[in-house]
Image (tube, rainbow, N blue to C red):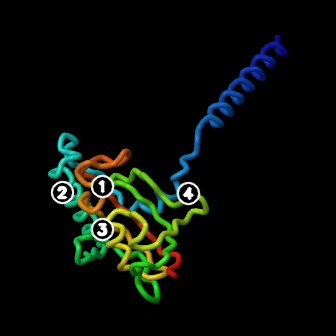
């Protein structure tokens, strides 16, 4: 009788442990977890009414909300002459990015709610190299990155007019402001 109860306890424990191991093995780690830590301070818990999202009114509300949140967090927000808002995280050295430069960057592209839509970490060696003003990029990227030097890093808030516009793209909805955190690794 004692042996039967002990066998039942051992079998039950074995089943529980096996089930726990199987369940934990099914969970997938979030591949963007470390990236989310990098962008956490730029994420806004939006109060914008979902019925106006993907409209010009909704976009302006998201931009206003983001700017207010960053100001509240005491971030220093600068603005390019073309209207791109940005926050410098790290000042680089040397010349700024110019037309024709071969530029190597690390970047994270995400929405104001923190959902990542692209990152250099998702591709190849984790960097992206392009020829400035020759490679086809969104206007906001081209205009914003020109404030950075080698080693510099900044977060850029890009309105849809300088991103994917009123039509959006296959993965980006219309009237969607984008945030890019870009670090310039090299300029040649």
Q: Residue, x 81% and y 13% (percent of image)? A: 4
Q: CA distance from mark 3 to mark 2?
A: 20 Å
Q: Earlier in the sequence, mark 4 or mark 1?
A: 4
Give coordinates of residue 172: x percent, y percent.
34, 48
Q: Earlier in the sequence, mark 3 or mark 2?
A: 2
Mark 4 burial class by Cα count in 10 Å: few <14, some 14-19, many 20+: few
Q: Earlier in the sequence, mark 1 or mark 2?
A: 2
Mark 1 burial class by Cα count in 10 Å: few <14, some 14-19, many 20+: many
Local SS, label 4: loop
Q: Of discs 2 and 4, which sits in the foreground?
A: 4
- Rendered image: mark on residue 73: 3
Q: CA distance from mark 4 to mark 1?
A: 21 Å
Mark 2 burial class by Cα count in 10 Å: few <14, some 14-19, many 20+: some
Q: Residue, x 29% and y 72% (percent of image)? A: 74
Give coordinates of residue 6: x percent, y percent.
80, 19
Local SS, label 1: loop
Q: Tell me the residue that label 4 is attached to.
A: 123
């Amino acid at each position: 009788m004692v042996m039967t109860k002990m066998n039942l306890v051992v079998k039950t424990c074995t089943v529980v442990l096996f089930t726990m191991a199987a369940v934990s093995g099914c969970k997938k780690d979030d591949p963007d977890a470390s990236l989310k830590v990098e962008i956490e301070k730029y994420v806004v818990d939006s109060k914008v009414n979902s019925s106006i999202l993907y409209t010009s009114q909704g976009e302006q509300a998201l931009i206003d909300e983001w700017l207010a949140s960053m100001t509240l967090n005491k971030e220093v927000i600068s603005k390019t002459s073309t209207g791109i808002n940005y926050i410098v995280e790290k000042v680089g050295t040397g010349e700024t990015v110019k037309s024709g430069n071969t530029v190597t960057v690390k970047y994270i592209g995400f929405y104001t709610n923190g959902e990542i839509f692209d990152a250099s970490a998702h591709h190849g060696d984790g960097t992206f190299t392009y020829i400035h003003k020759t490679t086809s990029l969104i206007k906001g990227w081209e205009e914003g990155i020109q404030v950075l030097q080698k080693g510099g890093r900044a977060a850029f808030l890009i309105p849809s007019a300088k991103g994917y516009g009123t039509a959006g793209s296959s993965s980006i909805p219309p009237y969607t402001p984008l945030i890019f955190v870009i670090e310039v690794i090299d300029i040649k």
